[in-house]
Amino acid sequence: SFDPAKLASLSPATVEAWGLGEEGSVRYWSYHLLRSGFFVAQAAAGIALTRTRDETADSFGYLTSSVGAALYTEALQMFRQDWAFIKKGLYNEPYDMDLRHRQFDPLFILERARRFLREAPRTLERRTVGETDTSVWLKSSLYPDYYLNTWHYQTDGWLSSESAGVYETSTETLFLGQQDAMQRTTLVPLARHLKGKDLSSAKIMELACGTGRFATFVKDNFPAAHVTGLDLSPFYLQEARENMAHWNLLRGDGASGGGKTAGGADFLQAPAEDIPVPDASYDAITCVYLFHELTPEVRKKIVAEMYRVLKPGGMVVLTDSIQVGDRPELDEKIDAFTQFNEPNYSDYVRTDLGGLFKEAGFTCDAKELASRSKVLSFIKADEFFQ
């Protein structure tokens, strides 16, 4: 049965805290409950396709046991927190609630669902049998060794258009539709840091941007700023380019009467530990779900690069998985994610991130919990104070 104590470290919520009587709440909650319901159904379908194989039959417990109930309850709590941040004016209502967004196009939905339902049985089977060959199809000296891995047991790792096309759907399904809301918490410290500043010449980098979906939320909230999406995969950068083009069609210069002036966006293929841009050239860097996939040595190199690339007074916002101690009631099973071919995860959850950034010269700023994710912000000291 479902144990409410599993949610002990999430903020308690009264009826008022859900904001159900506030302007816009019906629209927000209707959209997110529908969206979450879709991903729950998709998760059930993906597992059902796999259950024909005896060795993966127990995976159905993901939805039918208290684990699934706890995850869905957490999704609701995450939406409550997301809505509260929106009402505080920390960031905009999600632009993808616009009915013109392609995610409401039946053909787009069917294509993404088709890709997921083809990939899910493969991923679950590899995880269940503990597949030992985690190499990818491409052998290349252009990529670091740690990168050439089938992360999450996903076909081709980061190195195919098929992988890039299914990634968003797979991860949202894993978290039952709350991933966007978790990631949007990244905007909280960024909004506070940039409040009142002229962003017409500002530059924000989304480091390891992947499909660029979060970069579109950055752009939607800071349209005057120039946004750079950096990633090592050309396949994911192509997806990021398409996501940004769709944002521009709806909300940017491409929108009819959109009223927003887009400050531009570009895409850069490079490793996060060797960013090919000048020193002190960016005002802010966001980085979402990268650090848990890195070795300690690479993490240290990336933090040093962040410091080099940021202007004095600039901010890094790091969003990733919770770590040991963030939610003590989950510590016992915090290493379980290693089962999804995450070889560096156990080291990550025990890494002193604050110490890592302070060693590079940063000042610790703030911390936010966002369900199974955490958001940390760091400031590069202004030269005047150095």
Image (cartoon, rainbow, N blue to C red):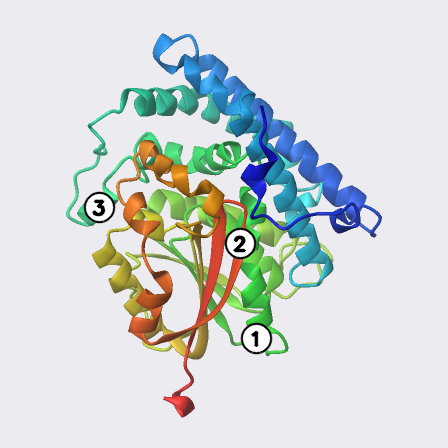
Q: Which mark is residue 200?
A: 1
Sort mark 2 into few (<14), some (14-19) or many (20+) by Cα contacts within 10 Å.
many
Image: 4 above or below 371: above
Quarter location, residue 35: top right
For the residue marked with disc 1, what is the amino acid? Ser
Position of residue 186 measured from the top left corner of the image (x, y, whole percent): 53, 58
- Local secondary structure at mark 3: helix
Q: Which residue is mark 3?
A: 146
Question: Which comes before the other along the chain, label 2 or label 1?
Answer: 1
Proximity of marks 2 and 1: CB atoms separated by less than 8 Å: no
- From the viewer's side, name the closer residue of 76 and 209: 76
Measuring 26% from the left and 63% from the top, which residue is drawn there?
A: 300
Q: Between residue 240 and residue 63, name the one nearer to us.
A: 63
From the viewer's perspective, is the residue at label 3 or at label 2 nearer?
2
Instruction: Locate the C terminus by quadrant.
Output: bottom left
- Looking at the image, the residue that sits furthest to the bottom is 384
Give the residue at x 51% y 48%: 213
Q: Which residue is pictured at 65% across the width and 63% down the height?
A: 90
